[in-house]
Image (cartoon, rainbow, N blue to C red):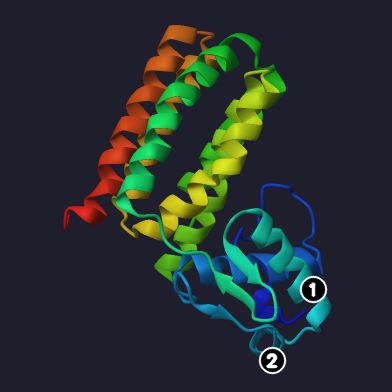
Amino acid sequence: MTRELKGVGTGEQGLLRRPPRLGDEVYNAIYSQLMSLKIPPGGRVSVDSLVRELGVSQTPIREALSRLEAQGLVIKTHLIGYSAAPQLNQKRLEQLYELRLLVEPFAAARAAEAMSEEAIASLEAIDIEMRSVRNDDARLAYGQFAQSDGAFHDLIALGSGNALIRETLGRLHTHVHLFRLYFHSRATSEANAEHALIIRAIRARDPAGAESAMREHILRSRTRFMAIFQGG
């Protein structure tokens, strides 16, 4: 793997805390291009172009694209190939937030009761990582933040002890679609402050507080991302 790809997407201090594998590096590189809109919504994803650009064979490229397809970031069309998934429209965004408001505050309340100390420590580690994301290219840093945001919310869903909640939220691919929708520093700085309140309530074993903090976070997130449709 070329030196330039090392650490792209998750940073050298990634969530897994282990030396990156070739497949992960390729995945992170393509992920960053999709999240930063270098590959725009609906744009064709050329395997041959990625082979030349990243300096790898087709095998890790296709493996990465399969992972991205499972996440809803790319679409594979028979006889045509891969393309970036279309962007959320306003109606779909509103529906996504309606579902989040029904499910995630409850998940946070349950996590405050059931989450292990080890899992809470992992949640705090993700939070620290999100606050420390640095990259000369702001949009690449934004892609890193999006991955960590997904891990943050997934860990809370897992901590709720309800597998169906986690599966439901996982199928939404929320962080992927939201962070492609609207690039703005507010979406990171304000989210960090809101995440801190959620963690504090979970750490305090305060279900009502965790539920309230998560609901407020989702409502504020909705306001931030709806701005794209309101010219904000």
Task: Choose between 64 and 8: the one closer to the eye.
Answer: 64
- Looking at the rendered structure, the secondary structure element under dot 1 is helix
The residue at the point 54 percent across, 16 percent down is 203
Quarter location, residue 151: top right
Quarter location, residue 95: top left
Q: Amino acid at mark 1?
A: Pro
* Residue that badge 1 annotates: 60
User: Would you say 113 lies left or right of 224 here?
Assistant: right
Q: Residues within 10 Å of mark 2 (few under 14, many from 20)?
A: few
Give the x, y percent position of residue 114. 65, 12
The residue at the point 55 percent across, 67 percent down is 32
Q: Quadrant of the N terminus?
A: bottom right
The residue at the point 43 percent across, 54 percent down is 179
Q: Is residue 123 above or below residue 73?
A: above
- Looking at the rendered structure, the secondary structure element under dot 2 is helix
Give the x, y percent position of residue 126. 58, 40
Evaluate whether residue 76 shows in this view: yes
Q: Amino acid at mark 2?
A: Arg
* Residue that badge 2 annotates: 52
Q: Is residue 150 above or below residue 45?
A: above
